[in-house]
Image (cartoon, rainbow, N blue to C red):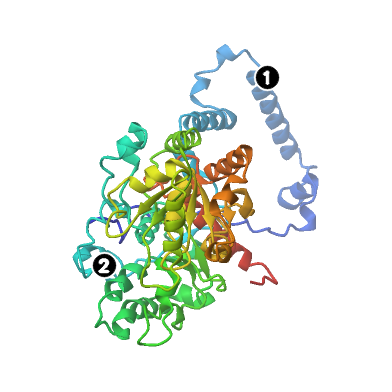
Amino acid sequence: MLLPLSNASSSPEPQIKKPKTPHDFQRKDSFKSPKAFLAAHYLSFNQPRIFLFLSVFSIQILLVVAFRSLPLSLHHHRQNFPSPFSTRHHQLLNQTVTTATTSPSTVKEESSCEFGKIFVYDLPSDLNKELVSNCDELNPWSSSCAALSNDGFGPVATGISSVVPGNLSPAWYWTDQFVTEILVHNRILNHKCRTQDPNNATAFYIPFYAGLAVGKSLFFKNSSAKERDFHCEMMLKWVQDQPYFQRNEGWDHFMTMGRISWDFRRSKDKDWGSSCIYKPGMRNITRLLIERNPWDYFDVGVPYPTGFHPRRDNDVVQWQDFVRNRNRKNLFCFAGAKRSKFNNDFRGLLSNHCRNESDSCRVVDCAGSKCSNGTSLILETFLDSAFCLQPRGDSFTRRSIFDCMIAGSIPVLFWKRSAYYQYEWFLPGEPESYSVFIDRNGVKNGTTSIRKVLESYSEDKIRRMREKVIEYIPKFVYARPQGGLETIKDAFDVAIDGVLRRFKEQEQPGYKW
């Protein structure tokens, strides 16, 4: 329906075999000189007939040499028999012409795979394709089919041209935050370092849609622990039967899990989520998640999908220029819904704080469906604000952090686990270079004014921080083409490079993690 999930149409990569080394036959000592060789195989030089024969033969050789020294005009169509050098010269010339006319995207595809190649398992369709095909059954309240349309990018973002440059509006979609499994699977099928020969692989990708599978049961009150674990157990049984998994006990295997880590870490049957990560066989598999457990080496945090999916390098560059030159009317903003059921609701506190500073702060109340996919209200707010307040979401992270930075706004964080311990492959190593951290306890007890903290930053400092955010925008986006952008690496490229580099490092003697 949406995805080329099963067998790829492309043929396996050709196996390049090294030519066998010719056998080094031992030569007898009697063959070390021409005279000895002739003496061993022919009659003696002292015999007159032999001497006469060799004399005539020598004269013939002299005549041939003399003939070849005549002018070239006497030779008959020599050009039809090119020398080995001229043949090689033409081959090199043709190769040069081909390379010169190659597009940038092709050059990227032909670049070397420094850290190895990836083999993609062809899982039973129940574990990926069928979950998407049955999109009407994934959500107890409404159909998920629209969210999973367009290869997982979701509906085209209609009406957004009033907020973004007109020629960039086709690069925007109303993308759901839980679709990384689909986006990564589609891209990896077209990756330059994909191999269809598992013997050539450094890494093995398991295209299991764990998030879609468990999401189907998370919100059904009567779903049992067995139902929530069903697809994960099916996947592990299938993968553990593969010889390449058994070879290294899964150390060179990885997968995408399109929800937060905690949705797969159920300890007791009655608790939330599945126990997939705790299952036998999952221990050594590297997992790409939108929120990781910071204390689990095998969890890797990757950016939440946002609405911007550039089609080419120029889309990225133009967007960066657009947000760099944006006139930002507000010092800071907050977009989110209160959590009135929680004691000491910090979101509600930020909302009230912002309302009290209405001349400097803009509030977007996301109660109900005001901020659901299909509105540009949040994007416009972030574009108009120098800073954006980012408390924790339902978990420690929230997609809004990336929506904020895509818009060139500087995130203000209150939990270090919201970003600093999550996305080390994707964010600058110096948190203060792109973000502001404020102690939430000072905000709670009234001793810290967010406005005063942000006003203490000079215009030059704000400009430099924004520039750092803008510099990293390519690492936050998932490009639209299945082959990626021409020369710019996006979030997918960074994630796959990181996985391959990690697996290569694990092969080194004495490696510790």
Q: Is residue 270 above or below residue 296?
A: below
- Callouts 2 and 1 close, C-beta under 8 Å: no
> Would residue 248 be visible to someone looking at this image?
yes
Out of 414 and 379, give the one closest to the viewer: 414
Mark 2 Cα-neighbour bin, 10 Å: few <14, some 14–19, many ≥20: some
Out of 340 and 245, give the one closest to the viewer: 340
Q: The residue tagged with tag 2: helix, strand or loop? A: helix
Out of 328 and 468, give the one closest to the viewer: 328
Out of 342 and 215, give the one closest to the viewer: 342
Q: Quadrant of the C terminus?
A: bottom right
- Residue sitting at x 33%, y 38%: 169
Q: Amino acid at mark 1?
A: Ala
| Quadrant housing residue 318 | top left
Please tell me how many numbered marks the rendered image carries: 2
In the displayed structure image, the side of residue 37 where residue 15 appears, left or right:
left
**Residue at the spot of label 2:** 131
**Residue at the spot of label 1:** 66
Q: Quadrant of the N terminus?
A: bottom left
Q: Is residue 276 above or below residue 195?
A: below
